[in-house]
Amino acid sequence: MNVILFGAPGVGKGTQAAILSERLSIPHISTGAIFRESIAAGRELGLKAKEYMDAGRLVPDEITTAIALEKLAAPDCANGFILDGYPRNTAQASALSEALEARDCQIDRVIFLIAPLEELTARMLKRGRGDDSEDVIRTRFEVYERETAPVLSYYTDRGLVTEVNGLGDVDEVSDRIMAALTVERE
């Protein structure tokens, strides 16, 4: 099963992707985590990504897409994957679709986690990450609405989107996602 977790910054995509990864026995692929690892290691790509992230801007498509597609080609993704933080715009969604089609593969479901922006801002401020100031968070939401939200239409037009309430206990949200995927808990 190939799943995309979609939603505004701070909605819990990373938390839920980790849980789903364990429950479904498929890898969780987070471009944000890949970027943070690269930054911590001082790699050139990571440092370039950090410049964009610190300004609350998205990392350019060519860098993000190259990283995501390389990971999806790994053997551990042969039985499926959970994408978190990618694709972030319609150009990336199109590039992903083309790359998957070339491998006789496709996205099976897009889970759209929803929650009020006020709640998301509070969550992000509590994380305490260096790139989570109120100004950067506001910029992230603006960029999300302008560039990322249209990806939802891309997948809605293909009949792949299921909305899931992202508020509540982590396990409750996870159970809602599993129900949306029509996969029974073990």
Image: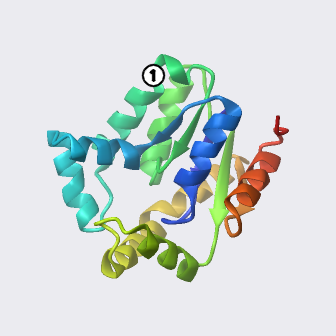
Residue at horizontal 65 percent and vertical 58 percent from the top: 112
Q: Is residue 184 above or below residue 154?
A: above
| Nearest to the observer: residue 18 or residue 117 | 18
How many marks the image carries: the answer is 1
Is residue 174 toward the left or the right of residue 94 in the image? right
Q: What element carries label 1?
A: loop
Q: Is residue 4 visible?
A: no
Residue 23's quadrant in the figure? top right
Q: Which amino acid does label 1 sit on?
A: Ala
Is residue 50 toward the left or the right of residue 165 in the image? left
Q: Residue furthest top?
A: 75
Residue at horizontal 77 percent and vertical 43 percent from the top: 181
Q: Where is residue 7 in the image (x, y as percent from the top left)?
A: 57, 61
Location of the N terminus (image quadrant): top right
Q: Position of residue 66 (x, y in %)?
A: 33, 34
Q: Residues within 10 Å of mark 1 (few under 14, many from 20)?
A: few
Is residue 3 toward the left or the right of residue 33 in the image? right
Q: Name the residue under label 1.
A: 73
Q: In this view, does 161 lie above or below 122?
A: above
Location of the C terminus (image quadrant): top right
Residue at horizontal 24 percent and vertical 51 percent from the top: 49
Q: Position of residue 166 (x, y in %)?
A: 67, 65
| Nearest to the observer: residue 152 or residue 163 | 163
